[in-house]
Image (tube, rainbow, N blue to C red):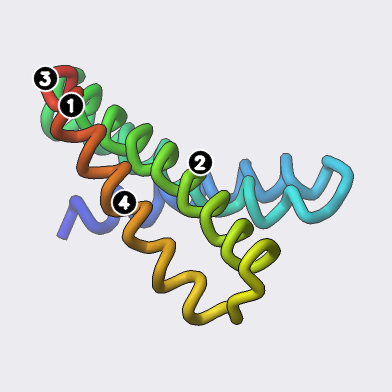
Amino acid sequence: MTEYLLRFIAGGVIVSAFAILGDMLKPKSFAGLLGAAPSVALATLSIAVVQHGPKYAAAESWTMIYGAIALACYSVAVCQLLIRFHLSALPATIAAFAVWLVVAFGLLAGFGGAA
């Protein structure tokens, strides 16, 4: 129960801080980017450090980096499928999901020793 309360408070504080930062920047589309992933990642990592130590948090941060790289590759693949091959959104996103899987698990398998 205490863990959930800690997650709630840490997540709320960090999300609020990033939301304020995003609101101060132009264009306002940054607000959505700054309000979600970085704040949740920082809250998760801070809790991981407290509960499991810095080595565990470091490994967790590497998996977040691998996921972010895979997301970038997925995004490029979706854009290519939408623009070059004129697929509609649903087939493009479903097909590009394979790219995310290959990149994410490839990085994990290739550099898993760092994690």
Residue 33, disc: none
Tell me which amino acid carries mark 1: Gly
Q: Nearer the viewer, mark 1 or mark 4?
A: 1
The Cα–Cα distance between marks 3 and 1, rounded to whole angstroms, is 8 Å
**Residue found at x 21% / y 43%:** 105
Amino acid of disc 2: Pro
Q: Amino acid at mark 3?
A: Gly
**Residue depicted at x 67% and y 62%:** 84
Q: Which residue is mark 4?
A: 7
Mark 2, residues whose alpha carbon is within 10 Å: few (<14), some, or many (≥20)?
A: some
The residue type indicated by label 4 comes to: Arg
Q: Looking at the picture, how far across and down is residue 83, in whole percent?
A: 69, 64
- The quadrant in which the C terminus is found is top left
Real-space Cα distance between discs 2 and 1? 25 Å
Name the residue tied to disc 1.
Answer: 110
Please name which of the two marks, 2 or 4, marks the residue nearer to the observer: 2
Q: Earlier in the sequence, mark 3 or mark 2?
A: 2
Furthest toward the front, the residue is: 85
Which residue is pictured at 29% across the width and 43% down the height? 104
- Residue 7 position within the rendered picture, expressed as x and y whole percent measured from the top left: 31, 51
Instruction: Find disc 2 in the rendering and name its residue.
Output: 38
> Is mark 2 in CB contact (under 8 Å) with mark 4?
no
- Kindly identify which residue carries mark 3: 113
Which image quarter is the N terminus in? bottom left
Mark 1–mark 4 Cα distance, whole angstroms, equals: 31 Å
Q: Nearer the viewer, residue 42 or 115?
A: 115
Q: Is residue 10 above or below residue 1?
A: above
Name the element at disc 3. loop
